[in-house]
Amino acid sequence: MSDTSGPKTVLTGNGLAQTCDRVSGDIVVDQSDDIVSEAALIAALEASGGVGFWMWDIPNDDAHADPVTALLFNISPARSRAGVGLAEIMKAVYHEDQAHITQVILDCVRSGGSYTAEYRVCSPEGRLRWVFTRGHFYLDENGRPTTGRGVVVEISDSKAAGVAFATRDGSTIEGALNKTADLCLSLHNAVSELGDTRIVALTETLLLEIGKHLADRQRAPANLSLH
């Protein structure tokens, strides 16, 4: 991984804004069709319900994501379609959260399995946003990392403040929703090898629906606190 000095800011649901005090360098914008902007991110969030997903070819360090995830991490959808490395993605993670989040992800990559995390990302125009992520990494028969897949949920409305965290699951996955998410990620991983774009699209639709349930679960504590 290369330059990890990165950040920008978040407009939370209650109107509060936090500003990142470090900038991770110039935003790379694809000149062909897609640009990185707050307006594009807001439109993508509204269209998806705040849920996105990502895929990572680990040996080739080649990651792809939907527009929501790409824009949350300050990457244009066009660049994401072409593929980017993990280092470029991690530049968007707020500097106070970056070291811990990166270490947990890399540990999970090496051993395989799932992780859950909440942390801040510096998305377009210097807005700091909270995201919830659940990812799973796969190993081949020789124990070498092959792919990673995951869901990203924008949770700024329910996370105006707090502490970032990342944890790896143990040998037993707790909770029906977590199990469902991991099964769907594994299904998406398997059908991707078939090369049938229609079936892949169906699994991606299912992933987004599961992501919405994950989002509802993460937002529930904030909603309860209002009553």
Image (cartoon, helix red, strand yellow):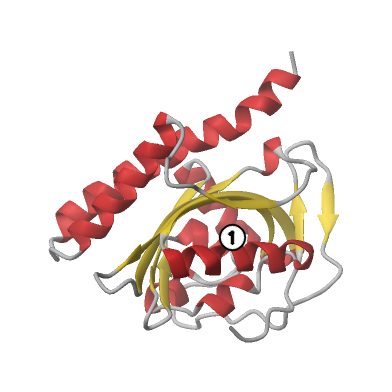
Q: Name the residue at 43% across, 74% down.
A: 78
Q: In which quarter of the image is the C terminus?
A: top right
Q: Name the residue at 72% across, 40% down.
A: 159
The residue closer to the viewer here, 139 or 62, is: 139
Where residue 120 sits in the image (x, y, percent)? 70, 56
Q: Name the residue at 34% across, 63% down.
A: 138
> How many marks on residues?
1
Q: Is residue 206 left or right of residue 25?
A: left
Where residue 209 sits in the image (x, y, percent)? 38, 38
Visible residue check, residue 37: no
Q: Name the residue at 75% across, 44% down.
A: 12
User: Where 89 sits versus 190, above or below?
Assistant: below
Where residue 175 sits in the image (x, y, percent)? 45, 31
Where residue 64 sits in the image (x, y, percent)? 40, 69
Q: In which quarter of the image is the N terminus?
A: bottom right
User: Where 178 sits versus 204, above or below?
Assistant: above
Task: Categorize mark 1 by other alpha carbons within 10 Å: few (<14), some (14-19), many (20+).
Answer: many
- The quarter of the picture where residue 126 lies is bottom right
The residue closer to the viewer here, 24 or 127, is: 24
- The quarter of the picture where residue 198 lies is bottom left
Q: In this view, does 18 lie to the left or right of 61?
A: right
Element class at badge 1? helix
The residue at which mark 1 appears reads as 72
Q: Is residue 132 left or right of residue 146?
A: right
Residue extending furthest toward the right = 21
Three-letter amino acid code at the position of disc 1: Leu
